[in-house]
Image (spheres, grey):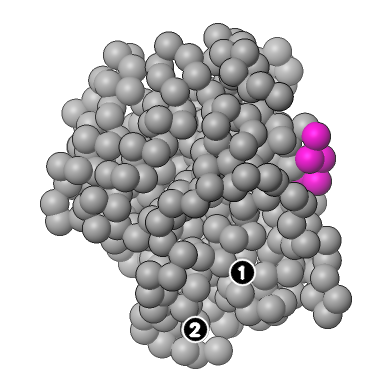
Amino acid sequence: MASGESQAGAAAGAATSGGSGLPASGSMDAGASSGANGADASDAAPTSPEGSTSSDGGAFCNPGTSGNGSFTLTSATDPPEWTLQPGAKAGTLTKSANFMSPSYGLNFAYQIYTSANYGSGKPAIFLVFGDGISDYLSDDTNNGGFHAQTVLDNLTSTDDIPATVALFIDPPTDGNPNDSSNLRVETYDPPTDKYPTFLMTEIIPATITGKYSISSDPDAWAIIGYSASGGQGFNVAWKLPNVFHKFIGSNASYGAANVAMYGNVNWAQIIASTTPPHDLRVSNVTCLHDLMDQRGFWLTIITNIHNTLVSNGYPARLETGPNSHFPPIDGEHDLPNSLRWMFQGCKFTSN
């Protein structure tokens, strides 16, 4: 599991456990920034870099409403997608590399996945995973592991999701292991423009643009995260509504933004007061023993976010599991289903 929750939050959680190219509209939408210390996202709007982009043949998603709503998971069993299924083909994962961010002055470890059915010159969906290597690529279920590589291998082999390019990014490091937890929180918790700008003007142009054939359709772009990286993932999707139309959060730390140092950013209020609604599809997972600290109870916060999304016309799903904020994590078991739901009805007409 990625470290980095506050000691108070970790203690509270334990106490309650009980058991190639960028879209042409790649700049941040000024209207999407409400609540982030009053800042206007357009002040830091990145410019879309040049790069080869395949033709998408127009809009390609018609998901309908199947799977929308709230669900309760009574027991969590290991999903079959954690094991490469008969007939499924393994994709390719690059070796871990470091990207030195000019804005952070820190190294971000990353790896890039391409599914077996990915082909250069043909469009692919693009996924960005926060806590990507340490949690999502991990197979260590006891300490936090989403088995994402094998999950993607299976889902792309059965056409449950289209051909995929995925960027797995870890929190930054400065070479001092004692700083890793603080750096994770300092990177992911602030609901500001810094991390969205880092993605759009630094790491994506450096590692993806011109190198991989990803779709230019924002319906093909999803950002995914757990806990703190989930909170930041929603911040990215909200600040970049013309880039990311999809967000998957596992125990996402929406509540971390609603503190005085960040201007008490209340995402539920922002969602409810934003008109017209963003073009955004959201899948959340929480649990009965989610994080609880001075900022609130993540179960209540995430459930309120989901209900607010639904009330305001957003396509949304929420799964509530029996476990804790910390491993075993219900979102690990839900990842295959959340990805299926996120991309149901999505096809590339040019493929």
In the rendered image, the vertical position of residue 221 relative to residue 196, given as above or below: below
In the rendered image, the vertical position of residue 309 relative to residue 314, given as above or below: above
Q: How many marks?
A: 2
**Residue picked out by circle 1:** 164
Name the residue: 80% across, 75% down: 88
* Mark 1: amino acid: Thr
- Decide whether residue 141 is among the magenta residues: yes
* Mark 2: amino acid: Phe
- Decide whether residue 297 is among the magenta residues: no
- The residue lying toward the viewer, choosing from 13 and 73, is 73
Q: Quadrant of the C terminus?
A: bottom right
**Residue picked out by circle 2:** 348
Of the two numbered discs 2 and 1 on the same chain, state the one appearing first in sequence. Answer: 1
Residue 284 in percent (x, y) is at: 47, 47
What's the magenta region?
136-142
121 left or right, relative to 277: right
Looking at this rendering, what residue extends furthest in the front direction?
74
Residue 62 sits in quarter: bottom left
